[in-house]
Each structure stands twice: as structure tokens, then as C-alpha cells.
Image (cartoon, rainbow, N blue to C red):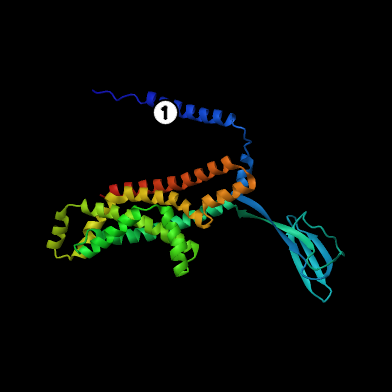
Amino acid sequence: MKSEPRLWPWHLLLAAILVAMAAGLWGATKRMDYTWRWNRVPDYFFYRAEELHKIPFDGNVVEIVDNGKTTAVTLHGQEGERVVLSVATGSVPVRPGEELFEGDLVGSTFRWRLGPLMTGLWVTIWLSFTSGIVGMVLGLVVGLCRVAKNPTLRGLAATYVELIRGTPLLVQIFIFYFFLGTVLNLDRIVAGIGALSVFAGAYVAEIIRAGIQSIPKGQMEAARSLGMSVPQAMVQVILPQAFKRTLPPLAGQFISLIKDSSLVSVISITDLTKSGREVITSTFATFEIWFTVAAMYLVVTSVLSQVIQWMERRLSVSD
């Protein structure tokens, strides 16, 4: 009976390599003349915002009632106005009977709000998701045109694919924003989504084309022999099989799209990358913020990768 190879030495070697890499990184940081400020990073995920409450008229403080976490301050105006403000306990700088003028501070309330990094992450996810959906639809149409019998459709689709894949995404974003955005009066968000969608659509089209051509021609012939039209055979027979084969490269393209979306920061869209730059300008915590931004991109792409792997397992089970 053939014995299975022992894998623990290889796992041990992997652990040793990772420990050596971590030690090397730690040693490199120690040799740098840099003060690490990791304690500042959490405030840029969530922070406790203070909202100031001021008297809206000239008047007096009638009553202050402490309710535990909040304090009710009753104000009475000179012309009969009456208002009760609920503020945080301990933030009240006035006393009962004190005369106030319009705009004077009465107290504060505190609420947890999203920091710039979380706001930028949401913009990145929203841009990537929207661009991915539009790019998928565009790529599907162009991919079908790539395998069409009509030479005009094939020529237009090939021109689009070669033009987009042969030019940098950064240049395309500039063209969409400065040229098309000016001519068509597009918002920067629309221009950014348009550039990302057109860029992704070209690569999705080639993936779809390869997936369709990987299906044996006998499948189409069998569907046609059953009385199906060409569109029916494509939708009901060819595309479902092609989708299963193209799922891994499509997943890779969408992961790349999330990372490529960082380029829209050049047209002043406040995505995760631009939010990171803005935080650095106010804190000078360069390394901490960029490491954090990289980790946030890694988390998003890793989650998407796990979702795609789950879909692949479900499709393989259904077969």
C-alpha cells in the first residue's frame, strides 16, 4: 500500500518563510527614522462627531432637567417663543435664569459617524459594482458580436476591443472626463463609471468570446435540430455552458476592476485611494494609512474571491 507523503515539513517551511518575512519587515521599520501613529487610524474608520446646539432667538434659560445621559434645556424667548433642546449631559455651559442671545451655545450632542476611509470604501465598492454590471452587459453584447456571422458587427466589436485594450485606463478616464464630460456635460461620477465600464467591457467581451468558442459546435447543431432558432440556442444552450467556463476569468476581471477603480481619484472622485491621500495630508501618517488602504482593498477582493469560489462549487455540484 502506497503511503501518503508527509506534508508537515512543507507547512513548517511555509511558516518559517512567513516569519522571516515579518521579521525582515519589522527590522526594516526599526531602521527608519519614522514615528508610527497607528493610534490615529481607528478615528478615520468611525469617529464621534459633536453637534452644537444654539439658541435660535434672544431669551432666557427657564429650566434644566438632567435625565441621565441627556439633559433637557428649556428656553424662553423675549417674544414668547419656547423651545426644549435635548443635549448631552455634561455639555451644558448655561444655568437656569441666564440670559442668552441668538446663536449662543446651549449644549452638544455626540453621534458616531463614518470616517473618511469608510466613506471612501463605500464609494469604491459602489463604483466597482455599478461599473461591473454595466461592463458585464456591454461585454456580453460585444462578445456575441465577436462571434456573429455579420462582418460589420465583428469588425466594430474587434475595433472596440483592440482600441480599449490597447490604451491605458488612465488615459481613457481623462478622455471621458475632460472631453466627453465637457461635450455631454457629464458629472465626474458618470464619467468615472463610464470609463471603468467601457474598459471592463472590452475584457469581458474577449472572455465571453473565448467561452462561446470553447463549446463544441455540435451543441449548436443539436439545438438547431430540435427546432430552436439561433438566439434561442445561444441563450438556452451555449451561454449557460460558456458561463460556467468563464466564471474564473470573469472573477479575476472584476477583482482587477476593484483595484483599477483607484485611478478615478485623478478626476477628484473621493474613493478609497483619494480618501487615504486626504487623510495623509492632515496627519502625515503616510505608511500607516497606505498600509490600511491596501488592507481594505485586500479584504474587499478576498471577499469577492470567496463568493466566486462558492458559486463555482455550487455550479459544479449542480452538474
Amino acid under disc 1: Leu
Residue 66 position in % (x across, y down): 78, 58
In the rendered image, which quarter is residue 9 located in? Answer: top left
Of residues 86 and 245, which is closer to you in this image? Answer: 245
Number of numbered labels in the structure image: 1
**Residue neighbourhood size for the residue with mark 1, other residues' Cα within 10 Å, grouped as few (<14), some (14–19), many (≥20):** few
Residue 279 position in % (x across, y down): 60, 49
Above-or-below relation of 174 to 6: below
Specify whether 213 is left or right of 11.
left
Above-or-below relation of 288 to 56: above
Q: Is residue 241 visible?
A: no
Q: Residue at x 54, y 53 (%)?
A: 120
Specify whether 67 is left or right of 34.
right
Of residues 172 and 38, which is closer to you in this image? Answer: 172
Residue 221 position in % (x across, y down): 13, 58
Q: Residue at x 80, y 61 (%)?
A: 65
Of residues 306 and 159, which is closer to you in this image? Answer: 159
Residue 31 position in % (x across, y down): 58, 29
Quarter of the image for the N terminus: give it.
top left
Q: Residue at x 85, y 60 (%)?
A: 95
Specify whether 318 is left or right of 66.
left
> Label 1: which residue?
14
Secondary structure beneath label 1: helix
